[in-house]
Image (tube, helix red, strand yellow):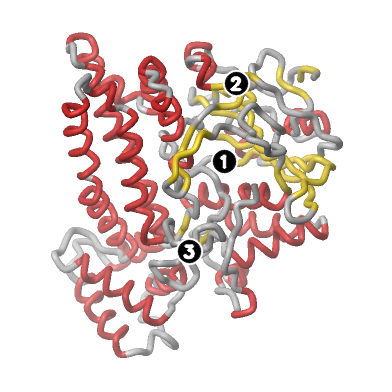
């Protein structure tokens, strides 16, 4: 394979900060497999610029050769990461079966980012798969991940989608594609599970050090006095990292709940230590509110339903804590107790942050003992009416009571009067409450039926116009206007999307 030459603005990571500096068991060196005819289908100019990359040079036929996997940057060391994971509660040995970490880019602000090709061909972890990806699923990840970024939710990003000119065989033949995914790292709970399964204490410690250096610099600074003087610093570090990761995951799930997002496949290999959303396979956004909403075609028991996401996140974090027990104490019983205490604190921490989020959605300043009941009663009413989750909260951000069905019901009017009485207790004026609500409740989400229409047009008709139009609207989700009315509308009965698919 030939090497790509500048100018592309590459600024590789210092060796001591690179994933390749971890123990060799944690990855395998491998290069992408060249494709027949790489063509850039979507390119994220704004993201490229923020990364310090030369967008004009990359968004070219030569750049397509690199982003499609036909060339690699000179001086880079492409690799596939090893990891394990509990998939629907069952442990498996996994790894990057179709993704290759091409290089790590140092952005102008100093932040380090993984530049990964997804759908780049077989790796040592492919487990019999072809290592490829279809155009539709890669466009879907681009659309949803960039929508999440605009919504203000921590997420991996999408730099480009490259059509390969080759078919991918799934249930039918699909046009192939490669996604360039950007993340502050791809280290997952499953990464730690892989090291723990090998009883590799040195690799576990190396991963802890890597994650703290990469994602928790402030934590590292706080720990330095302990690390210099405390003989028990390794256990303290592991426990503090568990707590820090838990707090980030709680923030992430609270944000998902805020906008009605359902991840769909919340396995431990899809829980990042950075706190970024990763893997946009069978994900979806709720239309009508119901806590048991599931879209994933493979989630037959509702394990990853909307309302289950907090509890599943706690379960996943418990698996993370288990991997670090050897670093907490040599005696397993001594290690289990403090780790268990941390994990058991999850429900209270989550409940506090969820209620704070709901106060923002309802424009409430300060705290009132009745706030939780006010929020949950609204959700119960929404469920009874099959009310649209996004539009209901947005409708409440107007200065007058919403009218028409379902707002004319006596139950809603009673709730609305309670809410108005609570708003009257705010220490800030109504205008501040409405502003808070409009900044917390999006007017636009990537509605499933609109996403599917765009993907179908791109995959079956080679028409990217609907995708481009959808991306433009999703870029400003908190802005309203008559030009966005069509994107706010819930699906008609015949437009409803009841199932989403992994697309692997």
Residue 465 versus residue 324 in the image, above or below: below
Query: Label 3 belongs to which residue?
Result: 294
Q: Nearer the viewer, residue 501 or 400?
A: 501
Residue 90 versus residue 490 in the image, above or below: above
Query: Label 2 belongs to which residue?
Result: 28
> Horizontal and vertical percent for residue 376?
27, 69
Q: Is residue 290 left or right of residue 373?
A: right
Residue 258 versus residue 178 in the image, above or below: below
Categorize mark 3 by other alpha carbons within 10 Å: few (<14), some (14-19), many (20+): many
Query: Label 1 belongs to which residue?
Result: 157
Q: Secondary structure at mark 3?
A: loop
Q: Which mark is residue 464?
A: none
Picture quadrant of residue 464: bottom right
C-beta proximity under 8 Å, tags 2 and 1:
no
Q: Is residue 411 left or right of residue 2?
A: left
C-beta proximity under 8 Å, tags 1 and 3:
no
Find the distance from the CA under tag 2 to the CA under tag 1. Answer: 24 Å
> Horizontal and vertical percent for residue 4?
76, 20
Q: Is residue 318 left or right of residue 295?
A: left
């Amino acid at each position: 394979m030939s090497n790509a030459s500048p100018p592309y603005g590459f600024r590789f990571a210092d060796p001591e900060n690179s994933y390749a500096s971890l123990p060799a068991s944690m990855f395998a060196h491998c290069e992408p497999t060249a494709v027949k005819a790489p063509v850039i289908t979507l390119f994220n100019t704004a993201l490229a610029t923020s990364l310090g990359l030369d967008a004009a040079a990359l968004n070219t036929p030569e750049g397509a050769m690199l982003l499609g996997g036909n060339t690699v940057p000179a001086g880079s060391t492409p690799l596939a990461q090893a990891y394990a994971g509990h998939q629907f509660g069952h442990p498996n040995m996994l790894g990057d079966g179709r993704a290759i970490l091409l290089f790590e880019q140092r952005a102008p602000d100093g932040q380090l980012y993984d530049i990964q090709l997804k759908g780049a061909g077989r790796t040592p972890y492919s487990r019999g798969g072809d290592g490829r990806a279809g155009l539709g699923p890669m466009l879907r990840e681009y659309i949803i991940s960039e929508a999440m970024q605009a919504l203000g939710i921590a997420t991996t990003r999408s730099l480009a989608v490259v059509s390969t000119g080759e078919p991918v065989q799934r249930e039918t033949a699909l046009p192939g594609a490669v996604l360039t995914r950007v993340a502050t790292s791809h280290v997952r709970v499953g990464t730690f599970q892989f090291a723990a399964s090998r009883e590799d204490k040195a690799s576990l410690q190396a991963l802890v050090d890597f994650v703290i250096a990469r994602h928790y610099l402030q934590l590292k600074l706080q720990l330095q006095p302990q690390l210099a003087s405390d003989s028990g610093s390794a256990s303290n570090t592991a426990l503090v990292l568990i707590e820090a990761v838990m707090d980030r995951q709680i923030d992430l799930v609270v944000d998902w709940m805020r906008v009605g997002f359902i991840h769909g496949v919340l396995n431990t290999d899809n829980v990042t230590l950075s706190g970024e959303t990763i893997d946009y396979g069978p994900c979806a956004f709720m239309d009508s509110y119901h806590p048991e909403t599931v879209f994933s075609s493979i989630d037959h028991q509702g394990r990853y339903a909307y309302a289950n996401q907090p509890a599943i996140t706690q379960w996943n974090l418990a698996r993370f804590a288990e991997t670090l027990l050897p670093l907490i104490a040599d005696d397993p019983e001594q290690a289990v107790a403090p780790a268990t205490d941390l994990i058991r604190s999850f429900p209270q921490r989550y409940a506090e942050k969820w209620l704070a989020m709901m106060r923002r959605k309802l424009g409430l300043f300060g705290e009132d003992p009745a706030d939780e009941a006010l929020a949950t009663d609204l959700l119960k009413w929404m469920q009874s009416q099959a009310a649209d989750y996004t539009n209901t909260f947005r409708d409440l951000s107007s200065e007058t009571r919403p009218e028409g069905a379902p707002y004319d019901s006596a139950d809603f009017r009673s709730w609305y009067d309670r809410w108005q009485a609570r708003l009257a207790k705010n220490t800030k004026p109504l205008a501040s409450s409405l502003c808070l609500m409009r900044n917390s409740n999006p007017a636009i989400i990537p509605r499933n039926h609109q996403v599917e229409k765009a993907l179908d047009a791109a995959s079956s008709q080679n028409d990217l116009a609907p995708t481009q139009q959808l991306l433009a609207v999703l870029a400003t989700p908190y802005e309203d206007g008559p030009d966005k009315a069509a994107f706010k509308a819930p699906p008609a009965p015949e437009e409803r999307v009841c199932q989403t698919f992994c697309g692997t």
